[in-house]
Image (tube, helix red, strand yellow):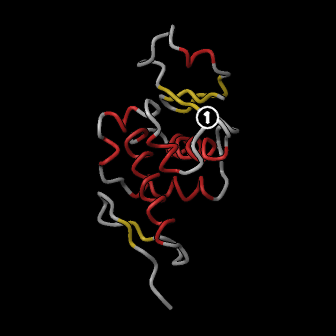
C-alpha cells in the first residue's frame, strides 16, 4: 500500500485523503488550489468551494477551454493570473475546498463567473450576467 500524496502548502503540506490520483490529476488539484487561494483566501470556506466550482463549471461549458489549464489561463479571465498571485503556495483550506468541489458540491448552482462588487464598476459587462448569489465578497453569476 502506498502512502497518500502530500501536496505543498503554506501550512506545511496537505495530505490527500487517498492515494489513487494520477500525476496529471495531482497537478490539476494543485493548480485549482492555487486559483482558490489567490482568488478567495480570507473568504468563507463555502466561497472557496464556490470559486473552485466556477472553474469546474467552465471546464464543462462549451464556451470555455476543455482543460483546467486552459480555463484558468484563458486570457483576461482571472486577475490573479495577470498579477501573478496564482503562483502563491495555497493553504490547506484551499485544497480542502477543491476536493469538495471535485466531489460535485457546487454552491453556485452552475455559475460561470464571479467578481467582487466593490472592485468592479457597475458599468462592467459582468453585471449583465444573471446573478445567482453572493458569498462573502464575491458575486456568482451564470
Taking the view exactly as shown, the residue that stands out farthest to the bottom is 1
- Position of 93 with respect to 130 (left or right) is left
Image position of 58 with respect to 139: above or below: below
In which quarter of the view is residue 8 placed? bottom left
Q: Residue at horizontal 51%, vertical 78%?
A: 19
In front of the other: 36 or 63: 63
Task: Decide: few, some or many residues near mark 1? Use Cα within 10 Å; few <14, some 14-19, many ≥20.
Answer: many
In front of the other: 27 or 88: 27
Give the image location of residue 91, x and y in percent: 36, 54
Give the image location of residue 107, x and y in percent: 65, 42
Q: Residue at horizontal 67%, vertical 41%?
A: 61
* Secondary element type, mark 1: loop
- Position of 91 with respect to 112 (left or right) is left
Image position of 6 with respect to 117: above or below: below
Taking the view exactly as shown, the residue that stands out farthest to the top is 123
Give the image location of residue 130, x and y in percent: 68, 22
Image quadrant in which the C terminus is located: top right
Q: Residue at horizontal 53%, vertical 73%?
A: 21
Taking the view exactly as shown, the residue that stands out farthest to the right is 109
Give the image location of residue 114, x and y in percent: 54, 30
Image position of 101 with respect to 3: above or below: above
In which quarter of the view is residue 76 placed? top left
- Position of 92 with respect to 44 (left or right) is left
In which quarter of the view is residue 83 placed? top left
- Position of 42 with respect to 24 (left or right) is left
The residue pinned by badge 1 equals 112
Q: Residue at horizontal 34%, vertical 34%?
A: 82
Query: What is the number of callouts on the image?
Result: 1
Amino acid at each position: 500500500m502506498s502512502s497518500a500524496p502530500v501536496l505543498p502548502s503554506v501550512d506545511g503540506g496537505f495530505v490527500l485523503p487517498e492515494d489513487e490520483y494520477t500525476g496529471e490529476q495531482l497537478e490539476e488539484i494543485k493548480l485549482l488550489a492555487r486559483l482558490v487561494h489567490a482568488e478567495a483566501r480570507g473568504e468563507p470556506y463555502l466561497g472557496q468551494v464556490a470559486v473552485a466550482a466556477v472553474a469546474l463549471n467552465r471546464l464543462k461549458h462549451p464556451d470555455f477551454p476543455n482543460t483546467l489549464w486552459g480555463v484558468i489561463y484563458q486570457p483576461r479571465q482571472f486577475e490573479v493570473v495577470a498579477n501573478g498571485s496564482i503562483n502563491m503556495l495555497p493553504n490547506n483550506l484551499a485544497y480542502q475546498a477543491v476536493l469538495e468541489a471535485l466531489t460535485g458540491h457546487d454552491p453556485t448552482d452552475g455559475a460561470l463567473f464571479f467578481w467582487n462588487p466593490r472592485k468592479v464598476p457597475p458599468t462592467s459587462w459582468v453585471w449583465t450576467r444573471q446573478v445567482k448569489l453572493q458569498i462573502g465578497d464575491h458575486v456568482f453569476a451564470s
